[in-house]
Image (cartoon, rainbow, N blue to C red):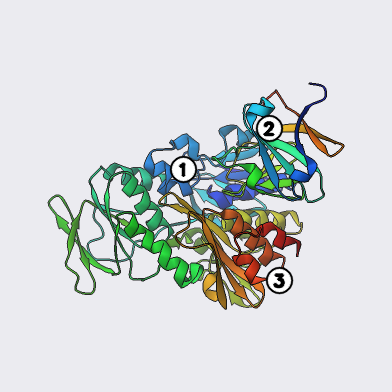
């Protein structure tokens, strides 16, 4: 897996938004949200909010954080740490690389939240 | 018994405002003592009390605002099952019902409120409930047997959410509210009428009346309505008619209280070392006294603002008031006040699985509400906060990706 899993083309993810990649593709416990910050950078977190059943890929991505579309808890794109209730637990962050316009995912198999 | 807290902050009340203040102090690098005094077993979240918890879908541990280990990790001393009985602002001293006196550089009052109990004759009856605390929810839940006939007084957020949950538990529910369109100031007439109408769709009878009195019955309670409507018997009654802020401590310290504790823009009360957050705080800015927002998000933001004031850092940027509510399986969000808009733009239709409404003044969004499409309201909140003008026809077009409107 040293080359990672090719999961999307960069142009498929608008800035400020995200897309969810099915766990059948990523081999992770949860689906993975690919999140593109307003500066164009791409990040990956477990897709399901740690509070209730909501997809972080549907949330607003801004200034280093994604905002859950259900109750607006915010998670750090870099490390998955939660900033702001009602969620109390961070989520799992995965490493991504962009090469030649393709997004590669390196799943975090430790499964730990921040 | 007394102790001295060096450069410490003492927070009275472990609701969302108090816990958010503690969290924001640590997040902002505050290194002094932080002590949180709370009456309950542990600080818990209230929104599920009318929904998942009342329905039995979530247990008491899942209500915790923070996991138990969080308090140690954040070096927050939690003093639970304890009530503050007096406040001395000048000394920063708080007397506790345990007999202890705590002193701190700053005291933050996050005392919340209690459910209003209007003086309706006969309301001092065991079958009359309110819903504010965990104990209230447990007591109400015990009355909600399948087939029970329940009267909900007040069709605001608590009343409507609880009525929805009761229906799910198999109760027969009647809602009484004198307003034809509850929540109209926030949602505007059309949206408010549609939302209130959803109760009838779900088999709940809505009665546009006040309650004039209650009467004891051998196996129930009789409600007498205004307007000459015939009285009806119920197994239980829930009063969902608002919140009364808890201001006793503030009064004991001689702070200025006007149906809420008056604070300045930095959350300082009339005593500069005593700050107030959440439901009891009424902010006076440029001579204008504002009502408390009485919403979860506002209480959380208050905590962040009070912490910034204590830390001497810039407050978080102001944002338009926002809330969510869940009823009858629909997730509703609102920002601003639709009744204050010059015109309303509907995106989708009221019969659609999801839709939203935007309120505009000129070409600026001032408010919005949504059903099962929260990102419409999240977009509106950003449009309001950033004062971005919009083309109303693009808002109304369900083919528009709303987020593109934020790019101007």
- Quarter of the view holding residue A102: top right
The residue at the point 21 percent across, 51 percent down is B235
The residue at the point 54 percent across, 63 percent down is B293
Q: Earlier in the sequence, mark 1 or mark 3?
A: 1
The residue at the point 71 percent across, 69 percent down is B387
Q: Are the residues under badges 3 and 2 in a single subunit?
A: no
Let me know if residue B183 appears in the view: no
Give the numbered dot on residue B389.
3
* Chain to which mark 2 belongs: A
How far across and down, in percent of the image, does residue A22 sit?
Answer: 64, 32
- Quarter of the view holding residue B239: bottom left
Establish if B113 lies above or below B193: above
* Chain to which mark 1 belongs: B
How far across and down, in percent of the image, does residue B341 sit?
Answer: 57, 75
Dot 2 crowding, Cα within 10 Å, few <14, some 14–19, many 20+: many
Q: Quadrant of the C terminus of chain B?
A: bottom right
Q: Nearer the viewer, mark 3 or mark 2?
A: 3
Establish if A48 lies above or below B21: above
- Along the line of sight, the residue nearer the viewer: A98 or B130: A98
For label 3, the SS is loop
Q: Nearer the viewer, mark 2 or mark 1?
A: 2
Query: How far is disc 2 from disc 1 in space, using C-alphas?
Result: 32 Å
Dot 3 crowding, Cα within 10 Å, few <14, some 14–19, many 20+: some
Q: Are the residues under badges 1 and 3 in a single subunit?
A: yes
* Residue at the spot of label 1: B40
How far across and down, in percent of the image, does residue B129 sit?
Answer: 31, 53
Residues at marks 3 and 2 touching, judged by CB atoms closer than 8 Å: no
Q: Residue furthest front?
A: B399
Query: How far is disc 3 from disc 2 in space, using C-alphas?
Result: 37 Å
Give the numbered dot on residue A92.
2
The residue at the point 14 percent across, 55 percent down is B217
């Amino acid at each position: 897996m040293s080359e990672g899993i090719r999961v999307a083309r960069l142009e498929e993810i608008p800035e400020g938004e995200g897309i969810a990649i099915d766990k059948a593709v990523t081999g992770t416990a949860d689906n993975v949200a690919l999140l593109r910050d307003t500066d164009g950078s791409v990040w990956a977190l477990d897709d399901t909010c740690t509070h209730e059943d909501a997809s972080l890929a549907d949330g607003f991505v801004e200034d280093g954080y994604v905002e859950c579309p259900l109750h607006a808890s915010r998670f750090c794109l870099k490390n998955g740490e939660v900033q702001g209730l009602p969620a109390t637990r961070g989520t799992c962050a995965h490493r991504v690389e962009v090469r030649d316009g393709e997004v590669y995912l390196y799943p975090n198999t430790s499964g730990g939240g921040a | 018994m007394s102790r001295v807290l060096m450069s410490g902050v003492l927070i009275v009340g472990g609701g969302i405002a108090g816990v958010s203040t503690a969290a924001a102090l640590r997040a902002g690098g505050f290194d002094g003592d932080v002590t949180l005094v709370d009456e309950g077993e542990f600080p818990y979240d209230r929104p599920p009390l009318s929904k998942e918890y009342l329905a039995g879908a979530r247990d008491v541990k899942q209500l915790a605002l923070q996991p138990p280990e969080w308090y140690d990790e954040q070096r927050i001393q939690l003093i639970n099952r304890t009530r503050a009985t007096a406040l001395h602002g000048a000394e920063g001293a708080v007397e506790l019902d345990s007999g202890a006196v705590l002193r701190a550089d700053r005291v933050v009052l996050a005392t919340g409120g209690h459910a209003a109990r209007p003086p309706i004759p006969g309301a001092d009856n065991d079958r009359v409930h309110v819903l504010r605390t965990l104990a209230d929810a447990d007591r109400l839940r015990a009355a909600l047997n399948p087939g029970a006939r329940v009267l909900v007084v007040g069709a605001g957020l608590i009343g409507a959410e609880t009525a929805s949950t009761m229906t799910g538990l198999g109760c027969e529910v009647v809602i009484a509210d004198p307003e034809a369109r509850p929540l109209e100031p926030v949602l505007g007439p059309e949206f408010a009428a549609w939302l209130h109408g959803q109760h009838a769709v779900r088999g709940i009878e809505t009665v546009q009346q006040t309650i004039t009195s209650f009467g004891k019955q051998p196996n129930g309670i009789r409600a007498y309505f205004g307007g000459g409507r015939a009285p009806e018997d119920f197994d239980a009654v829930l009063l969902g008619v608002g919140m009364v802020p808890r201001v006793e401590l503030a009064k004991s310290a001689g702070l200025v209280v006007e149906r809420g504790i008056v604070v300045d823009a930095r959350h300082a009360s009339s005593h500069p070392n005593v700050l107030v957050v959440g439901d009891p705080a009424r902010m006076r800015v440029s001579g204008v006294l504002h009502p408390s927002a009485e919403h979860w998000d506002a209480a959380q933001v208050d905590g962040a603002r009070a912490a910034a004031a204590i830390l001497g850092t810039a407050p978080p940027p102001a944002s338009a008031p926002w809330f969510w509510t869940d009823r009858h399986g629909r997730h509703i969000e609102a920002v601003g006040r639709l009744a204050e808009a010059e015109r309303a733009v509907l995106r989708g239709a009221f019969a659609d699985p999801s839709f939203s409404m935007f309120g505009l003044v000129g070409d600026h969004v001032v408010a919005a509400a949504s059903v099962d499409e929260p990102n419409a309201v999240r977009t509106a909140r950003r449009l309001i906060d950033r004062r971005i003008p919009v083309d109303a026809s693009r808002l109304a077009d369900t083919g528009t990706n709303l987020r593109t409107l934020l790019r101007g």
